[in-house]
Amino acid sequence: MGTPGLGPYLVFQIAIVGTRVEQARFQCHNCGVTVACGSALTELVKNKSLDDCCQITEKVLCNALDGVPQDKMHVPTFVLGALKLAIGDVSK
Protein backbone atom coordinates (compact mmCIF):
# COMPACT_ATOMS: atom_id res chain seq x y z
CA MET A 1 0.00 0.00 0.00
CA GLY A 2 1.37 3.37 -0.92
CA THR A 3 4.65 3.91 -2.71
CA PRO A 4 8.04 3.78 -0.97
CA GLY A 5 9.67 7.19 -1.15
CA LEU A 6 6.39 8.95 -1.91
CA GLY A 7 4.68 9.31 1.46
CA PRO A 8 3.20 6.66 3.72
CA TYR A 9 3.62 3.06 2.63
CA LEU A 10 3.43 -0.46 4.02
CA VAL A 11 4.71 -3.60 2.34
CA PHE A 12 3.36 -6.84 3.85
CA GLN A 13 4.96 -10.16 2.91
CA ILE A 14 3.78 -13.66 3.74
CA ALA A 15 5.39 -17.07 3.28
CA ILE A 16 2.97 -19.93 2.66
CA VAL A 17 3.68 -23.58 3.45
CA GLY A 18 0.92 -25.88 2.30
CA THR A 19 -2.21 -23.87 2.95
CA ARG A 20 -0.99 -21.89 5.95
CA VAL A 21 0.93 -18.68 6.53
CA GLU A 22 4.20 -19.76 8.09
CA GLN A 23 5.90 -16.36 8.23
CA ALA A 24 4.84 -12.75 7.90
CA ARG A 25 6.79 -9.52 7.91
CA PHE A 26 6.29 -5.92 6.98
CA GLN A 27 8.16 -2.75 6.20
CA CYS A 28 6.56 0.65 6.52
CA HIS A 29 7.05 4.37 6.67
CA ASN A 30 4.29 6.20 8.52
CA CYS A 31 3.21 6.76 12.11
CA GLY A 32 3.60 4.57 15.19
CA VAL A 33 0.05 3.28 14.81
CA THR A 34 1.01 1.87 11.40
CA VAL A 35 3.97 0.08 12.95
CA ALA A 36 1.75 -1.31 15.73
CA CYS A 37 -0.93 -2.46 13.27
CA GLY A 38 1.65 -4.09 11.01
CA SER A 39 3.23 -5.88 13.94
CA ALA A 40 -0.10 -7.07 15.31
CA LEU A 41 -1.16 -8.28 11.88
CA THR A 42 1.98 -10.40 11.51
CA GLU A 43 0.96 -12.20 14.71
CA LEU A 44 -2.68 -12.54 13.67
CA VAL A 45 -1.88 -14.24 10.35
CA LYS A 46 0.76 -16.72 11.51
CA ASN A 47 -0.38 -20.34 11.21
CA LYS A 48 -3.67 -19.27 9.61
CA SER A 49 -5.06 -20.32 6.24
CA LEU A 50 -5.41 -17.67 3.55
CA ASP A 51 -9.20 -17.91 3.97
CA ASP A 52 -8.84 -17.21 7.71
CA CYS A 53 -6.53 -14.28 6.94
CA CYS A 54 -9.18 -12.81 4.65
CA GLN A 55 -11.61 -12.82 7.59
CA ILE A 56 -9.46 -10.45 9.67
CA THR A 57 -11.31 -7.14 9.97
CA GLU A 58 -10.42 -3.67 11.18
CA LYS A 59 -12.28 -4.46 14.41
CA VAL A 60 -10.20 -7.62 14.98
CA LEU A 61 -6.98 -5.69 14.35
CA CYS A 62 -8.05 -2.83 16.64
CA ASN A 63 -9.00 -5.31 19.38
CA ALA A 64 -5.58 -6.97 19.10
CA LEU A 65 -4.08 -3.56 19.95
CA ASP A 66 -6.59 -2.74 22.69
CA GLY A 67 -7.84 0.08 20.48
CA VAL A 68 -6.56 2.67 18.03
CA PRO A 69 -6.84 6.44 18.51
CA GLN A 70 -9.94 7.85 16.86
CA ASP A 71 -7.93 10.06 14.51
CA LYS A 72 -5.96 7.00 13.30
CA MET A 73 -8.89 4.70 12.48
CA HIS A 74 -7.88 4.76 8.81
CA VAL A 75 -4.64 2.92 9.60
CA PRO A 76 -6.11 -0.58 10.18
CA THR A 77 -7.86 -0.31 6.80
CA PHE A 78 -4.57 0.74 5.18
CA VAL A 79 -2.66 -2.16 6.77
CA LEU A 80 -5.34 -4.73 5.88
CA GLY A 81 -5.18 -3.46 2.31
CA ALA A 82 -1.52 -4.47 2.24
CA LEU A 83 -2.47 -7.94 3.51
CA LYS A 84 -5.04 -8.30 0.74
CA LEU A 85 -2.40 -7.32 -1.83
CA ALA A 86 -0.01 -9.93 -0.37
CA ILE A 87 -2.71 -12.62 -0.53
CA GLY A 88 -3.48 -11.60 -4.09
CA ASP A 89 0.20 -12.01 -5.00
CA VAL A 90 0.24 -15.50 -3.49
CA SER A 91 -2.91 -16.66 -5.26
CA LYS A 92 -1.63 -15.73 -8.75
Image (cartoon, rainbow, N blue to C red):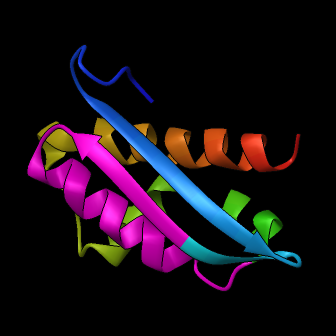
Q: Which residues are magenta?
A: 24-48
Residue 47 visible to the viewer: yes
Q: Residue at x 16, y 45 (%)?
A: 70
Q: Does the magenta-highlighted stretch encompass residue 44?
A: yes
Is 71 displayed left or right of 21 in the figure?
left
Count the marks.
0
Query: With respect to residue 83, does 39 lie above or below?
Result: below
Q: Residue at x 72, y 49 (%)?
A: 87
Q: Does the magenta-highlighted stretch encompass residue 16?
A: no
Query: With respect to residue 27, does 30 lie above or below?
Result: above
Q: Position of residue 15 (x, y in %)?
A: 66, 67
Quadrant of the image containing the C terminus: top right
Quadrant of the image containing the N terminus: top left
Q: Residue 20's quadrant in the figure?
A: bottom right
Q: Nearer the viewer, residue 69 or 79?
A: 79
Q: Residue at x 61, y 62 (%)?
A: 14
Q: Residue 53's quadrant in the figure?
A: bottom right
Q: Position of residue 30 (x, y in %)?
A: 17, 37
Is 17 displayed left or right of 66 in the figure?
right
Is 33 displayed left or right of 61 in the figure?
left
Q: Nearer the viewer, residue 70 or 36?
A: 36
